[in-house]
Amino acid sequence: MSTVTTLNASQRTLSGTGGARAVRASGLVPGIIYGNKKDPEMIAMDPKALMVECLQPGFFSRLYAIAIDGKEQEVLAKDVQFHPVTDRPLHVDFMRVGKGAKVHVFVPVVFINEDKAPGIKRGGVLNIVHHNLELICPAQFIPEKLTIDLTGRDINQTIHLEDLTLPEGVVAAHPERDNTVATIVAPTVESEKSAEGAGGGSASSSS
């Protein structure tokens, strides 16, 4: 389960492009909170605090608590617009999540113990098919990451979705599409030599 980080925000009354510009002129980032069968709520946030979270891995799969006037509501980040030159956040969208709600999120896949994989020791290459997997999770129990142990893995071995241990209540959103997570493939040099050998054997000369 990921840790819930609290972000402070204030309500804003001005809407539209003009309202957003006024918020940015005051040094804050305009945003909106919507969903969970409640009216949208316009907010303004500190750009530094928001940027710190944007730079963290899994920003869009982490549960946040937005605090406004001492009252908190749990949300997921859905979209952030950045300035094309400065990369500063210009606008942020959050979606409310209710207790017990299930959400679709992309969770990063992390591989460990590459030094204990015989296939990699012998020059094999870890070919990662999915760096992130789409999961359906209870909103309050989103895993921070999915860890795959490469200990004992050899060349030509495939790591499938069923090889992962998902937390209770968490399932893959697309089990068939995402079934192959990674493979350990033969060294590129060996593959090139095999290809050259095959090509050489089929060559013929004419006169």
Image: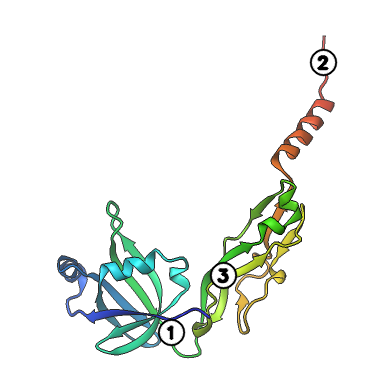
Return the residue found at the far top. Answer: 207
Mark 2, other Cα within 10 Å: few <14 / some 14–19 / many ≥20: few
Specify which label sits upstream in the sequence, 1 or 3. Answer: 1
Q: CA distance from mark 1 to mark 2?
A: 71 Å
Q: Is residue 204 left or right of residue 15?
A: right
Q: Amino acid at mark 3?
A: Glu
Query: Does 129 sit above or below residue 171?
Result: above
Specify which label sits upstream in the sequence, 1 or 2. Answer: 1
Q: Residue at x 30, y 53 (%)?
A: 84
Q: Is residue 138 left or right of residue 176?
A: left
Q: Do labels 3 and 2 touch, CB within 8 Å?
A: no
Using the image, tell me which numbered label, if any, was put on residue 35. Answer: none
Q: Secondary structure at mark 3?
A: strand
Which label lies toward us, 3 or 2?
3
The residue carrying mark 1 is: 97
The residue carrying mark 2 is: 205
Q: Amino acid at mark 2?
A: Ser
The quarter of the displayed image where residue 71 is located: bottom left
**Residue 190 x/y as whole percent:** 75, 38
Using the image, tell me which numbered label, if any, was put on residue 134. Answer: 3
The quarter of the displayed image where residue 86 is located: bottom left
Q: Is residue 86 left or right of residue 170?
A: left
**Residue 129 x/y as whole percent:** 63, 57
